[in-house]
Image: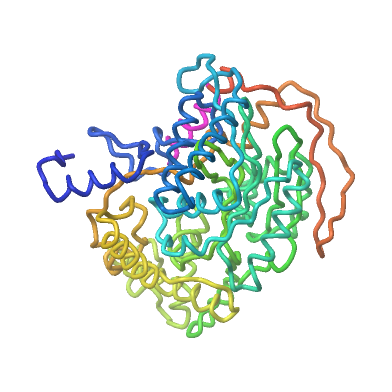
Amino acid sequence: MGDSSKCPFINAEYQRIGSTHRTLVSTGCTRDFCQSGRVVHTDEPRIGENRALDVVCREATNFLQDLHSEGCFKSETDFQTRLQSIQSEIFSNSIQGVERETKTVVTLGGNWEQSFEELEIGVRRAWRNSRKCIARNHCQELKLCDLRSITTSVGMAQELVRNATEAFNGGRIEPTVFVFPPRTNNSKGPMIWNHQLLDFAGYQLEDGTILGDPSNVELTKAIIDIGWTPPCPKRRSRWDLLPLVTMAEGDEPAMIDIPAPLSTLIPIRHPRYSAFEHMKLKWKTTPVLTRLGFDIGGVQYTAAPFMGWFMDAEIGVRNLADSFRYNVLPDVVQALYLNQENMYGHAEAFEDLAEYEQLALMSKAQAELNYAVQWSYNQIGVAMTDSLTASKKWCRFDDEFKANHGYRLPADPYWIAPPQGSIIPLWHRGGAPNYQPKPMISKHVQDPVKAWKRQNKQKEMTLIPTTILIPLQNASISPAVVLKKEPEVTVQEIEDSWEDEVEAAQTS
């Protein structure tokens, strides 16, 4: 990494970034080591951890000053009154606890209650600051569904399903974040087990193969362990939706089946290749990320599911095509050449082809699969964007931002460019500053399933067979297990949560 001070253009941009953003945090990279290619950066900030009083006060003050500089207060008096109010609230809610970074007992900063307007601005800024997202040009359209009054696991499940159904809007998806209560000190905060609201089960078969989504094998086992009854083996498929599992702070997990229209799957078809239909490929209607949270003004929202729409390549190039996910490209190759007598020319099987010939076939299969995904969503009338459109919109949004502010938005080049590579103009853009301001979208410091298992290790757990029906067609909800009151966070739990991060980094 070179010295930016030697370049007047880069240095000027960095100076503007530093002077504008009062709270800048680590991107996980250092002068000697870049982590941009990793899913999990070991030094990135996390939510779900205790923070010292001075840290919370500073971040809250910085956030309010940002709002003030953007004209959110009518006068300096209004700003100072609000600032004094939140500082008093932070001090009054402060308690003693173990700070994760130092593993020592310190005075922890308390929460302060953000108004709807403050929270709305915060989640929109956090999305704008999300370095890995290409769709940030829609950040001002993000709707806030304020669910901070919901304090039970059952309530979380009910309200998330109900409000997500409304935001889905019959396929005309409204980007929405569903914010549950913030984490309090010495606790994990409310959490959601699923990676997404709509997750496919992954079943480990006796022969070692996996039916369904390989990324969800452990999650599927965990949900079965707390009482979910999957379809009988003969009826299981690659497309079985897992129930949603929510876990409020200090409460037991609860499960709910996902109702229609959210649970409706979209068949992937191709207008020119009828053989696509024989593969019976499907995918979910909308991505709702449920393991991410928001870090806004010193307040940590550990359960804040985020709904948007898919980009074609997320499904056609990654989820369905990746060899460690559904790995359907070999089947697509057969579908594309099904009517030819000798599919592979001089070779008897695909594996016998030279690597460059395999690549040519796989590339064509990938392009047609991606086209089929976009075409299928268009036919059903469910919102989706294509990689080229998303790339052009992002470039225009970033250029306009620089023209107005004198610097560009944060961007991780490894993630921001769609996976089609150089045929997408954004791939050539380069040079984006990779920095991380707050407010920000963050991962939780702990894996929710592992955290729950640690909490209940060597404790008796009693399954509750009763199912409570909720006022949604074809949906039911049930508490999963009986737990005692959630204990305070200990030094051992902090060390265990660090192990979660290290394990995630090693596998990314």
Q: Residue furthest top?
A: 104
* Place of residue 493 in the rendered image (x, y in percent of width and height, measured from the top left): 59, 22
Relative to 332, residue 44 above or below:
above
Residue 217 at x, y = what percent? 61, 45
Residue 25: x and y in percent read 37, 37
Check if residue 497 falls in the magenta segment.
yes
Q: For residue 30, what is the image quadrant?
A: top left
Residue 440 in magenta stretch? no
Q: Which residue is the extreme one toward the right?
A: 466
Q: Position of residue 402 (x, y in %)?
A: 27, 59
Residue in front for this viewpoint, 135 or 358: 135
Vertical placement of residue 140 versus 172, above or below: above
User: Is 267 drawn above or below residue 442 in the view shown?
Assistant: below
Q: Is residue 281 left or right of residue 30?
A: right
- Judge by depth and name the residue closer to the eye, 427 or 186: 186
Instruction: Identify the image quadrant of residue 269.
Output: bottom right
Quadrant where the image shows the N terminus: top left
Q: Which residues are magenta?
A: 495-508
Query: Who's the residue at 69% across and 54% down the image?
Result: 160
Above or below: residue 281 compared with residue 483: below
Q: Residue at x 32, y 46 (%)?
A: 20
Q: Is residue 230 left or right of residue 16?
A: right
- The kind of secondary structure the magenta stretch mainly shows is helix
Residue name at image x 28 percent, y 42 percent: 18
